[in-house]
Amino acid sequence: MDWGRAKNVLIYAFLLLNLVLGYQLWADVREQADTSLDFASLSESTQKVMKEKSIQLLCQIPSMTPQLPKIIYQYVNGESIGGQVVLKDKIESQLVFRDKELVSALKGAIPEIGSYRYDPLASEYTSKSETERVKQAGAAGRFVMHALVDQKWPLFNDQLELYYSDQRIISYRQSPIEITTSGEEEQQKMMPASNALKTLVERHLPPGSNIKDIQLGYYGQVYNSESQVAAPSWRFTLESGEMYYVQGISGDVTVSSPKTEKERE
């Protein structure tokens, strides 16, 4: 065997691999730069207020401003949270972080599982009623998923809850929904996330706030009605668990303040 030739082949192979990996890294960084803004992109007045109020931005600011309509949704069974269903075959909880594997494992057990997306922030922060559901399920915790509008935008009002224990998903709660497009108005261009952030910083966020995540989805006030309306909204999540929803067209702000289990203790 010609070891010298084999050595050269291996060297060239590693060089080619490094080139491929380097290109992929460059492409990922470029894509992120094209779709996100940083602190320096904010207006001087917004930066000034953030410094005065000691508000920190710990994430990128999305730059996308798509045109999205309002939607109408309703729960098929009339309940926002369905009854607990115990899984016949327990699923490794690690799969929740790998979408394709999770869908493959649960598609026969949970209806339309492929039309949901995992929300790590909603999973981390829980209200008193949500914690009570976890206890009733005999679980150690829960994963939260949201139904997707057009297979892309999460509907923050809706929750599919996966309960886990001993590193396995043991049961779930789901209430199937039907989503239709509202015919009230035409699609309108979204308010930029930077403008929504400006509104929050100047009028709503308390001093010392740390903004952990900014995400676009759908959200709406819930009324005593069979059908509910949700509008495209920016969700700002703070390290403390508070979530601020800024309606993407009107700029109206809604605050949700779930408490963590640690805080309640």
Image (tube, rainbow, N blue to C red):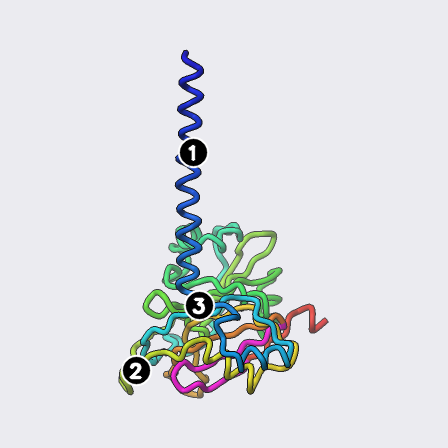
**Which residue is the site of mark 2?**
182
Q: Which quadrant of the view contains residue 148?
A: bottom left
- The residue pinned by badge 3 equals 146
Quarter of the figure that contains the N terminus: top left
Q: Amino acid at mark 1?
A: Leu
Check the image and report above or below for 67 versus 250. Answer: above
Residue situated furthest right in the rendering: 265
What number is the disc on residue 169? Answer: none
Name the residue nearer the viewer: 48 or 60. Answer: 48
Query: Which residue is the site of mark 1?
Result: 15
Q: Amino acid at mark 2?
A: Ser
Q: CA distance from mark 3 to mark 1?
A: 43 Å
Instruction: Please give the range of residues in magenta.
Output: 240-255
Distance CA(mark 2)–CA(mark 1): 54 Å
Tell me whether circle 2 and circle 1 mark residues in contact (CB < 8 Å): no
Could you say whether the residue bearing mark 1 is in a helix, strand or loop?
helix
Distance Cα–Cα, label 2 vs label 3 = 20 Å
